[in-house]
Image (spheres, grey):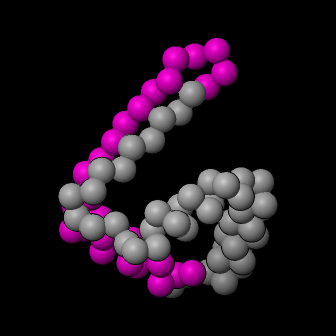
Amino acid sequence: MINPASLFKAKQALSRFTANHPKFVAFFQATLQGGIPEGSVIEITVTKPGEEPVTTNMKVQPSDIELFKELKELT
């Protein structure tokens, strides 16, 4: 069972994140709008100040899609 206080804190944190990074959030909303089909590749790169970029990716599996659906139902 989800603690209502924890859920409230998470919603506040998401609101701050959205306010701080509106383009990032808009990108995800546009990309995820039609869903992410199995076989899609998600790639992310992190570049820390003064360091080389680090990139990883994942191919979306059926279990990932199920997880995305469950997370979506929480919102």
Residue 24 location in percent, x, y?
62, 54
From the top left corner, tell me how far across and down residue 73 is, in percent.
47, 84
- Magenta stretch encompasses residue 36: no
Pick whichever, 75 or 42, lies toward us: 42
Residue at 30% over, 74% down: 66
Quadrant where the C terminus sits is: bottom right
Q: Is residue 67 at least partly visible in the picture?
A: no
In this picture, residue 32 sits left or right of residue 11: left
Query: Measured along the vertical axis of the image, is residue 43 above or below residue 38?
Result: above
Q: Is residue 39 left or right of residue 56?
A: left
Can see residue 47? yes
Residue in the foreground of this view, choosing between 31 and 57: 31
Residue shown at 52%/66% (left/top)? Answer: 30
Residue 70 location, x and y as percent? Answer: 40, 79
Residue 63 painted magenta? yes
Residue 13 image-quadrant placement: bottom right
Give the residue at x 62% y 60%.
25
**Quadrant in which residue 5 is drawn:** bottom right
Vertical placement of 18 versus 5: above or below? above
Q: Which residues are magenta?
A: 48-75
- Horizontal relation, residue 33 to residue 60: left or right: right
Q: Is residue 53 above or below residue 32?
A: above
